[in-house]
Amino acid sequence: MSASTPSFEQGPIRPPSEAHSLLVRVIRNCTWNRCTFCPVYKGSGSSLRPLEDVLADVDAMAAAAAVLEERGVGAIHSGLVPQEAYQVALFLQDGGRTVFLQDADPCAVKPEKLTAVIRRVRERFPSVDRVTTYGRASTLARRTAPQLALLVEAGLTRVHLGLESGADEVLMAIDKGCNSGDLIAAGENVVCAGLELCFYLMPGLGGRAAAAAHVAGSARVIRAVAAAAPGERPLVVRLRTAAVVPGTPLAEREAAGEFVLPDDVEVAQELRDLLGQLGDARLELRSDHALNLLPGLEGSLPADRGRLIALLDEFLVLPRDEQARYAVGARLGIYRSLADRLDAQRRATLEQQFGGYGQPSADELLEAATALRARFL
Ligand code: SF4
């Protein structure tokens, strides 16, 4: 048997929209690693990777891609390429168009170095038309226009940025390491540089106590950045309903009674309030994570605002027991939309789940649905 092509590193996560992207690990783990809700890198230190190692990884992925194109995915099972080339196979199957730079904040790497990585990616994979990266607000707020122009010129096209909340009191409570001014500055820097920007917003992250501030602060930041984005590249806001993951600092706060995670009815109300407070902001709203209760809550704002508010109202006006049953059904993957409640077979499948639990109350079901969110992280 021929020897395998060289191995290469892969980081642990990427956004759902990058499921078929080539993953290039520029920096290991998270340099900040303090956000209280985040379980991803807790217990792992961060380190910069030498530029030559990252470039060698890109070359190794190109070598694996050449074998995969000739021999197909069987090359993984027969050891002609390393196991991690499975992601390269996904990338090729999807047309070889998208690349994602890992891990938490590749933008913290010197722009000249990041530029060299992006150039190497573009050279080795000429079919690529989208190169994206995660970036922290505290980093991007400090990047100058010429620095960002370097990255754009090299071929970076999109930044994924964890907004989480736009409220200073929430950002402080979750130890995000930035304030709302940083978020606005970072967002404006990115969109004005000619990059697409995806904000990740976490409804429910303020807890019950700061829900109103969470909505108002988030709406303020989103409005400011959306106003700076050009018409051809509107801000994209992706929803990630907050969850409490065991072992995180947020779980400790919850256990100490200092934080109460809003249930799905309260989160739906937050989203309705947010849509109201976004006014005429122009943006794309996406609900692309299994954590979210209503996958259909997507559209172009402000044009689709009425339709999205109507969708939330359809849930909010249900009897509480129906809301609770829908929330559990959605978390168990039985329901994908509110209309699924009317499907007798799906409903029967859901009721079977309650078989051994007597007749749980609506509050108990909502509590169960809220706890189930952690399964998606
Ligand atoms: S910056 Fe991102 S990866 Fe790092 S701790 Fe916060 S949420 Fe997690």
Image (tube, rainbow, N blue to C red):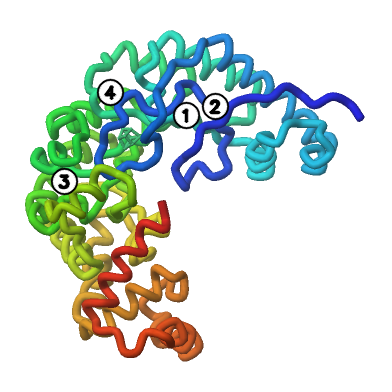
Query: Considering the numbered disc 3 on the image, is that residue within a helix, a strand or a loop?
Result: helix
Instruction: Give the image quarter of residue 21.
Output: top right
First of labels 4, 3 by sequence position: 4
**Of pointers 1 and 2, the one earlier in the residue sequence:** 2
Q: Are marks 1 and 2 in contact (CB under 8 Å)?
A: yes
How many C-alpha atoms fall within 10 Å of the one at disc 2: few (<14), some, or many (≥20)?
Answer: many
Question: Which mark is in front, 4 or 1?
Answer: 1
Q: How many residues crowd mark 3 within 10 Å: few (<14), some (14–19), many (20+)?
A: many
Q: Mark 3 vs mark 2: give the one in front.
A: 2
User: Which residue is label 4 attached to?
Assistant: 140
Q: In whole angstroms, how far apart are the C-alphas of marks 3 and 1?
A: 26 Å
Marker disc for residue 102: 1
Residue under label 3: 218
In which quarter of the view is residue 159 placed? top left
Mark 3 in CB contact with mark 2 (< 8 angstroms): no
**Residue receiving disc 2:** 24
Q: CA distance from mark 4 to mark 1?
A: 16 Å
Q: Residues within 10 Å of mark 4 (few under 14, many from 20)?
A: many
- Element type at marker 4? helix
- Which residue type does callout 4 highlight? Leu
In the displayed structure, would residue 248 be above or below residue 189?
below
Sequence-earlier tag: 4 or 1: 1
